[in-house]
Image (spheres, coloured by chain):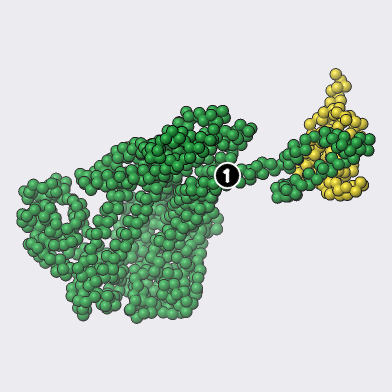
Amino acid sequence: MTTPATTFLSGTLDLIVLQLLGEQPTNGYDLMTRIQATSRDVLSVPTGSLYPALYRLEQRGLIRAAWADTEQGRRAKVYSLTRAGRKHLAGQREAWEQFAGALGAILGTS
Amino acid sequence: MLSLLNRLRLWCRALLFSRRLDREMREEMAAHLARSTADGIARGLSPDEARLAARRTFGHLESLHEDGREARGIRWVESLLADVRIGGRHLWRTPLSSLTMVVVLALGLGFNSAVFVLIHSFVNSMPPGMTRQESLVRIRGIDRGGVGGRATGREFSYPEYREYAARQDLFSATTAWTSSDVVLDVGTDGENLQSGAATYVTSRYFQVLGLAPIAGVDLPTDVRDDDREAPPVAVISDWIWSRYYRRSPAAIGSTLRVNGVPVTIVGVAPYRFAGARSGGSPVRVWLPLGTRAQLQRTTDPIFTSYDFSIFGIAARLAPGVTVDQTVGTVRGVALSASRQPTRPVADEAWSTDVVTLEDNYFPPSGDTGERAGLGPYIALMVPLLVLVITCTNVSALLAGQAVARRREVAVRLALGASRWRVIRQFVIETVVLAVAAGALGLFVTFILVRTFDANIPSVNLVIDWRGSLFTFVLAVVTGLLFGLAPAMHATRLAVAETIKDAGGAVVAARTRLQAGLVVAQIAFTQPALLGVGALLLELTTDLQRHPAAVHADRILDVRFNTNPRYGALDENRERAIQRVEAKLAELPGVVAVMPQENLDDFFEVMVHPDDRVDTAAQTHLEIRAQGVPSRYFAMMDIPLVRGRTFADGAGADADAVVIGAGLAERLWGPLDPIGRRFRADPNPRGQVLFTVVGVVDDPEAGRGGSRDQRVYVPHRRRVTSHLLVRTQGPAESVLPAVRVTAMTEAPDHPIVSARTLASVQANERRSLTNLITGVGTAGLIALFLAAIGLYAVVSFAVGQRVREIGIRTALGADRARVVGLFLSKGFRISLIGLVLGLTFSVITVRLMAVSRGETPEPAAWGLAMIVAALVILVTLVASWIPARRAAQVDPLKALRTE
């Protein structure tokens, strides 16, 4: 199996989870595979981080969970973004873009 | 706001449905694993390999569960609850000591906060029946014309009241009142007369005070204050209403007689209301001011003259006016009023201040610059001391337990619990204990306050939320404080050492501290007990000194008012009472009537040097001289054994004294006491104060050591406070006739009480007995607390040495020796306390004696010995209980713990 190619910058996991759930509500397993797929196998989330992150976000009211039947006919917990989560995501994205821009500028000039 | 609510909802969900959330989490993770396995199989792995691979990537399931729970952010609550549960269970396992701690703490807390409530209410409460109102104030007169310019209270004259009332810019409404002692006849035609008070009020009195009758209507408001034709209507007190009318609505409209004048009841005042000042009689009626002339049979020009200062004033501040703004004006009014009376008032002697109705203390007036009373709060020191002792004891008990649990603590620490975690456990246990004690303490407070309330109707006792909060905060703070110390101690030991059972040094330090506390407790308990004992002794002597007089049931004690607030104590009054006396003597069944003064005179005397014989008792005596007419002895059946009684007639026998046979015997033995003299002591001029003219065989005059020795001197009329009426048969039967006579002859000076001497004495005995019980209980509680402390120390020592006891027992030490070991330990500690305590006791005995100018009586030393013996006994029992437990230690169990 793949080893995590890049360790997560702190806080970025929350951002990724929120972003992906914002695009489409999904369950934990699919979320993990989607992170891997979307990042072209660069990022791999250990389950040990993913679930606590989900619970933490849920506890903070940024995402909500509901039980639903998956296409395979299993019961799975599907997470979706709440309104607060959407707002939070927007804020975080902006902060990230600023940060990334600044970092890029620094790295570009040096 | 919404998000906050949302967060709260999520938090509650996490807390309340934690089991369901756990289940769902497991289900979710299981589903994840299943998907992962299925994907593995799809990639061509065998089912077993797929499952294994899935597991490997997933990670350790249990720790993931743990992390998941952690993420919900309520772990600390859960572990707190777990700690509370463990704490509760632990306390439950040692029910006796837990119960002791709870009870001891609850008693301390309850007592403390009850006294707090009491003191707070005394200092700071509205008069009973009234509620706090910002704008309601009392206008108080101050008189500095007395000795040394000391401020005393001063009542107002009606014209002065009018001047305050006229200042409507400051006071939107004003009322004045004046009270007199009256006789009330509640529709029983003279059968059941009741002495009480009448308050004559200006119109709108109740309105100004913010009160409305609880039944019926208010006094009429359209009557002029000085209208002597004012309708005789009254608002009665709640006390009268419930006592005589059983709270029946029919009371309204019925008639009662005040000083013999029929008055119609129109309303009932609020519960316990007895006037705008605390401390008035609850047997009270309120009437329009105009009726005063008729009811008090007076023609004094009170409405126009400044000479009749008889009014109290309350007022409503005008909107926006503060107390401070009124000061200048009211002082100005007082100043100009002081120039008016016929009898001149010293310059600047009169002043006036304005205070809220809660200010029960005089004078907190602004012009002296002092505020009322921190003083009463100093009384709080006593219950606080009790609380400190209580806490010390509880702490000692807890420390004992903490040591007993050293091993448990060490194991927890070894298993990786942080020190903080273990401390938290201890603190939580104490807080659980303290909260339980706090709840029980509230109950104790409630009971105590109820008791106070029932016995002190003149104070508005309120347990407000602050009082309860006070108790609870006190409980929790106490818990924290006293839980922390043992917890710190228990966790300070190194794990390895504790498990090896070698933490001796720290434990020893702790033990010394505790033993020190107990020594102090025992040392202080002794003088306290000694004080209590001395008081008890004195009280019981007093009790014995109240023998039923020979014909107590044939002597009526008829008392008159002697409070100047309810009428001048002048010659008119004396003449009226003399008339009553003469009339009473004519009543059928009455043998004799005799005036008596209320207060005896006290003298410090010594036997005249020329009249001394050689006994020690002659140097200093305190005597209580009761003024009696010569026929007193015959009437009271007191036999004269030597000499004569007093010669009647004004100025005769000015220095004569009749003494009891007991005193005569003590001072002069078999020699003739007649003609012997007393001098005042200390006395620079050496003149004779008394000459003995007679000796009576009187139980009253026989007792009392060198102080409080009763002697009789000739009666001189000053202020007659009561008449003694000797009757032929039982005195009860002439009681109605006596009352009617007194009321017809002296309506202005109503009888305050008329009872047979037998019932007066029974009453005195009863209140003495109550006092004895109360004092005795206090002493027992002090002893109990000291015993608890000692018990804690000894059981602490026992808990510490379980292994040693086991070894000793295994090596063949018999039980008695083990018991003896700990008994002697407890005894050693108490012995130090005893020695110290005895020293304090000696000082106490000396001080008590010195304060009375005596040499210590042998009885006091005996008492000190008894107290010491009692303390030894109690300390022995307190050490014996845990010592016996030590002896029952099973050596196998004690040693197996290794």
Res. B28 image quadrant: top right
At label 1, the amino acid type is Gly
**Can you give x and y, in whole percent of width and height, for residue B432 in the image?**
56, 46
**Can you give x and y, in whole percent of width and height, for residue B194 in the image?**
35, 72
**Can you give x and y, in whole percent of width and height, for residue B55 in the image?**
82, 36
Q: What SS does tag 1 mark?
A: helix
Q: Which chain is yellow?
A: A
A42 lies left or right of B465: right
B263 lies left or right of B740: right
Residue underneath mark 1: B87
> Residue at position x 56%, y 40% from top?
B426
> Residue at position x 73%, y 48% from top?
B19
Task: Please give the count of numbered marks on the rendered protein.
Answer: 1
> Residue at position x 18%, y 73% from top?
B592
Q: Chain of mark 1?
A: B
**Can you give x and y, in whole percent of width and height, for residue B777 in the image?**
37, 53
**Where B786 falls versus B586 (above or below)?**
above
| Residue B293 can be seen, yes or no | no
> Residue at position x 49%, y 59% from top?
B136
Of the 4 image quadrants, the one containing the C terminus of chain B is top right
Task: Compare residues B474 and B608 and report the one nearer the observer.
Answer: B474
How many C-alpha atoms fall within 10 Å of the one at disc 1: few (<14), some, or many (≥20)? many
| Residue B828 can be seen, yes or no | yes
- Furthest-top residue in view? A110
Task: Compare residues B495 and B212 and report the one nearer the observer.
Answer: B495
**Which shade of the palette goes to chain B?**
green
Task: Compare residues B852 and B28 and report the one nearer the observer.
Answer: B28
